Amino acid sequence: MPDGDQYVFDEFPWQPGELDARRERLCPEAGRSRERVHISCRLEGASFAPAEAPPKDEIVIVAYNVERGFRAAEQVELLLSGLDIPPPDVLLLNEVDRGCSRTGYRNVARDYARGLGMCYVFGVEFVELPRLWGAGGRVARACEHGNAIVSRYPLGNARLIRHRSNKSWYSTLQRTLRLGEPRLGGRMALAADVKVGDSYLHLYGLHFESGRANDAYRIAQAGEIAADAASRPFAAIAGGDTNASGYLRGGASGEPVAEALFRHGFLDAHASLPPNERATTRSGVVIDLVLGKGVEFAAAGVGSAKIWDPLSDHRPVWARVRLR
């Protein structure tokens, strides 16, 4: 592990003004070459946070698959209320739309940051291609979809980690018939460091490959995150939608995707909760996780089905992290 004394926090260059997410693309070259998975995309970010938020000894981290952001305004209102889960200091968001017709051409990550009074960084997982129908709804024209980190505190050293082991979602048949989920790009993690007073924490917003037969991809992707965290000087949090639907069936140790992270020192923030309190989707599986390495969890929980199920097909998971 590198020496923390040599560490430099490079705050994200927040972009001024309002970008037109419908026209100003982060992956302008996508589709112009033969590369269908490992596309090149720049990051976007802006800050609506106060000049300097007071530091804390503990921060609340929330991982949440927002289901494209169809009901983002209601999600933000509920997060601000503290009604069911503690108000977050950092959010690791999945399935975030940017400039898509199905979500009113909005920039969902930016809406989240503005609504919460925070800063954000967004990275593109997929360029969604036009379709008349399919999972996620109709897409009128190509748009962008990915992960975001939203924070009360400054974010820096932001990176998009496009996984080396990746499945192609580009289907000529689906693209021609305008159905299903034709896409450019592939699974990725969004990495950034958060600075809370004099403390630093490495963050990874995860979204591993989906599909019951794709464990090999998920295991490899988890291994890439574990290796990256091992090369960093400070404690790390990795959270998001792991799509590891076998988690907790017969015990956590039986889930190979989670094991790929556990073997490298990551711990499950929710390990002390009974299995019947851990479902993170309407279908009752546990796939949204908050994992930590070199941190202490003071508390953790899952949003209640009654409150959150009307707003997304996933429930938010949260953890209170003690900073050293």
Image: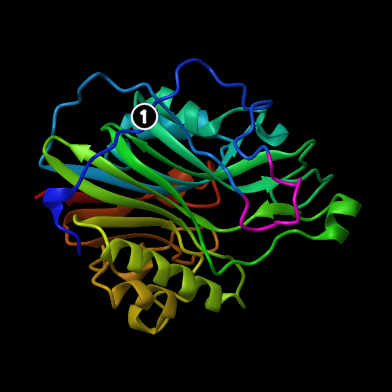
* Residue drawn at point x = 90 percent, y = 53 percent: 176
Can you say whether 118 is above or below 245 in the image? above
Question: Left or right: where does residue 164 sit relative to residue 37?
Answer: left
In front: 91, or 8?
8
* Span highlighted in magenta in the image: 29-39
Q: Position of residue 275 (x, y in %)?
A: 35, 70
Q: Position of residue 222 (x, y in %)?
A: 42, 69
Q: Position of residue 63 (x, y in %)?
A: 39, 49
Q: Is residue 30 magenta?
A: yes
- Say whether residue 234 is visible: yes
- Disc 1 crowd rating (10 Å Cα; few below 14, some 14-19, many 20+) is many
Q: Residue furthest top?
A: 17
* Residue drawn at point x = 62 percent, y = 78 percent: 213
Location of residue 209 (image quadrant): bottom right
Location of residue 30 (image quadrant): top right
* Residue drawn at point x = 29 percent, y = 37 percent: 10
